């Protein structure tokens, strides 16, 4: 839960209209109010986007993605959940680097049984190829609106995929992007 009110994922945030938003700023990491907020985060469909943004911008304030970021241990846990380095040295010593069985990338974890990185567990893939393909389709003359229609997404949702800050995209979305065949009828001359 951060300040980017215009980011598309925020519209799907479970905390968005919660009547008890103060719980996200509970005074202790595990009191009743904090536990309530963490439970909501646990069911939130944009939890990974939320954590990613907090990590990328080093946002440390209140409960984000189920971790009370004002407490170092919980911040470390958020970084770990994302498979990123950023935790304290003490915590890092308990970590190991593993290779994701799905994407083949190295990731950091403290769990001995973890075989997949956080994004793969969430059905996400590196957004790089999708960004490149969208730019190619745009260069061929497709408008954002048309891309949205072809992908079954809103125009600004498609635009957020090419946001440089966005590291991941859903695997299904990537498949849909690569399924777009720029035929003569689909491509309009700009
Ligand atoms: S993960 Fe939690 S803090 Fe982040 S948007 Fe969802 S409910 Fe809000
Ligand atoms: Zn992976």
Image (cartoon, rainbow, N blue to C red):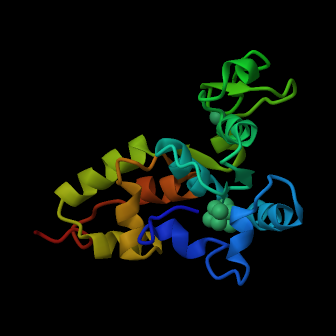
The count of marks equals 0
Image quarter hosting the C terminus = bottom left
Q: Is residue 155 left or right of residue 112?
A: left
* Residue 25 in which image quadrant: bottom right
The residue lying at 66 percent from left, 48 percent from top is 69
Q: Nearer the viewer, residue 104 or 187?
A: 104
Residue 90 location (% of width, % of height): 74, 19
Q: Nearer the viewer, residue 73 or 165?
A: 73
Please tell me which residue is depicted at 70% across the width and 72% down the height of the picture: 22
**Residue 129 x, y percent position in the rendering:** 40, 42
x and y percentages locating residue 143 in the rendered image: 23, 70
Residue that sits furthest to the front in the current view: 27
Q: Name the image quarter holding the N terminus.
A: bottom right
Residue 70 lies, with reference to residue 25, above or below; the image says: above
Quarter holding residue 16: bottom right
Looking at the image, residue 135 sits to the left or right of residue 26; the answer is left
Name the residue: 87% across, 59% down. 31
Residue 94, quarter of the rendered image: top right
| Residue 51 or residue 91, whichever sits in front | 91
- Residue lying at the far left in this picture: please name it: 190
Residue sitting at x 67%, y 73%: 15
Looking at the picture, tell me which residue is in the foreground, 185 or 170: 170
Left or right: where 178 falls relative to 84: left
Q: Is residue 132 shown above or below 144?
A: above
Q: Position of residue 98 (x, y in %)?
A: 71, 20
Q: Can residue 25 be seen?
A: yes
Residue 46 seen in the current view? no
Which quadrant of the render holds ligand 2?
Answer: top right
């Amino acid at each position: 839960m951060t300040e980017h009110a215009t980011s598309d994922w925020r519209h799907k945030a479970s905390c968005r209209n919660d009547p008890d938003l103060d719980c996200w700023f509970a005074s202790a990491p595990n009191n009743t109010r904090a536990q309530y907020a963490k439970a909501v985060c646990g069911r939130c469909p944009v939890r990974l986007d939320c954590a990613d943004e907090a990590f990328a911008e080093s946002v440390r304030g209140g409960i984000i993605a189920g971790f009370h970021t004002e407490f170092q241990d919980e911040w470390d846990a958020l970084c770990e959940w994302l498979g990123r380095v950023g935790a304290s040295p003490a915590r890092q010593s308990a970590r190991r680097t593993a290779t994701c069985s799905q994407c083949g990338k190295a990731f950091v974890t403290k769990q001995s049984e973890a075989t997949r990185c956080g994004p793969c567990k969430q059905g996400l893939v590196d957004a790089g190829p999708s960004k490149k393909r969208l730019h190619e389709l745009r260069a061929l003359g497709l408008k954002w609106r048309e891309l949205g229609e072809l992908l079954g997404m809103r125009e600004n949702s498609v635009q957020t995929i090419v946001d440089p800050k966005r590291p991941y995209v859903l695997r299904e979305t990537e498949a849909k992007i690569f399924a777009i065949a720029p035929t003569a009828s689909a491509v309009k001359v700009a």
